[in-house]
Amino acid sequence: MKNLVYCCFIVFIPLLFACDNKAKTDSMQIKGSDTIVNLIQVLAENFVQSHPNLNISVTGGGSGTGFASLINKTCNIAMSSREIEEKEVVLAKQNNVEPIGFKVGLDGLVVIVNKGNPVSKLTLAELRSIFMAKITNWKEVGGQDKTIVVLSRESNSGTHMFFKERVIKNNDINSSDEFTIHSLMMSSSQAVYDEVLQNPNALGYVGMGFVNNKIKGISVSLDKDNKYVYPTADTIIDNSYPICRPLYLYTDGKPKGLVEMFIDYALSNEGQKIVMDTDFIPLKKN
């Protein structure tokens, strides 16, 4: 398991290839979600072994950054931990870009706390109340008499957007509910992990790949009458864990050439094994 998120990965080998998949330049640019930058990095490392004249650059910055780059035609592939938003589709069409998404894996968002925190399970309603500051003390959910330190990703993050839609808004597209203004906005999932690791009162959310035995993941239930479920490969594939999501690669129009080959590689048996090896969930169990 890798906790360190690499912001950029580059294989310096030239090949003529275009950002718009039509004219050829010397690189393939992949930008976007920090959640899957490690996964795409490993896929790229293995892909260039069979394409030794290719130069691939993999850069994070958030799903919104990836979509902006795709819309501005400064990348070949946008990585995203959420579906593209309607306003982004409109901007893309205005710039003669046709975003097409390819699901390459699954992820569960894990609510994490310090290993010394006695709280180990929460309902979605309790999580919603904590992240909206309606519950502010750990003793209200069975913990110690300590103020909860709420951590969130920045708004450009697909992780932030998904958690807000699934937990804060409770899947209600008409809801105007938001994170508490007192939440600490963290620049990356690694930053959330690091804060929880050293702060006994902190609570945040990260992708499954950031969870290890140094911190504690929380089991989550739809409500107190339902079973509390811990995020695992099985509970995400069978959709019993309530905070899971697909992971995407987006291209401008139907992919061609090396872009198509890279997408195909990510979806191949070898590529899906890499998805599993980097602590995400492949699209189907082997």
Image (cartoon, helix red, strand yellow):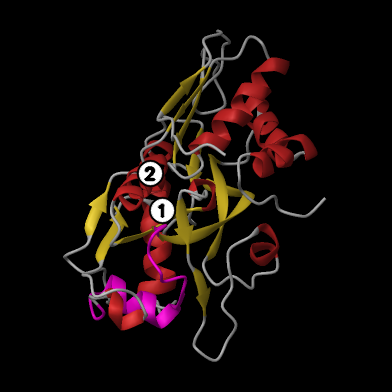
- Which secondary structure, mark 2? loop
Which residue has dot 2 on it? 62
State which region is magenta: 114-135
Kindly check if marks 1 and 2 are in contact, taking CB atoms under 8 A apart as contact.
Answer: yes
**Is 257 on the left or on the right of 20, as rendered?**
right
Q: Amino acid at mark 1?
A: Gly
Q: Position of residue 32 (x, y in %)?
A: 43, 39
Earlier in the chain: of badge 1 and badge 2, it is 2
Q: Position of residue 30 (x, y in %)?
A: 49, 31
Q: Amino acid at mark 2?
A: Gly
Foreground: 200 or 125?
A: 200
Residue drawn at point x = 67 percent, y = 23 percent = 46
| Looking at the image, residue 211 lies above or below residue 138 | above
- Which label belongs to residue 158? 1
Is 117 one of the magenta-colored residues?
yes
Crowding at dot 1, Cα within 10 Å, few <14 / some 14-19 / many 20+, comes out as many
User: Which residue is situated farthest in the right direction here?
Assistant: 286
Query: Which quadrant, please, contains the N terminus?
Result: top right
Q: CA distance from mark 1 to mark 2?
A: 6 Å
**Is 207 on the left or on the right of 265, as rendered?**
left
Crowding at dot 2, Cα within 10 Å, few <14 / some 14-19 / many 20+, comes out as many
Residue drawn at point x = 54 percent, y = 40 percent = 251
Q: Position of residue 140 (x, y in %)?
A: 30, 82
Residue drawn at point x = 26 percent, y = 71 percent = 178
Foreground: 33 or 98?
A: 33
| Residue 234 lies in quadrant | bottom right
- Which secondary structure, mark 1? helix
| Residue 8 lies in quadrant | top left
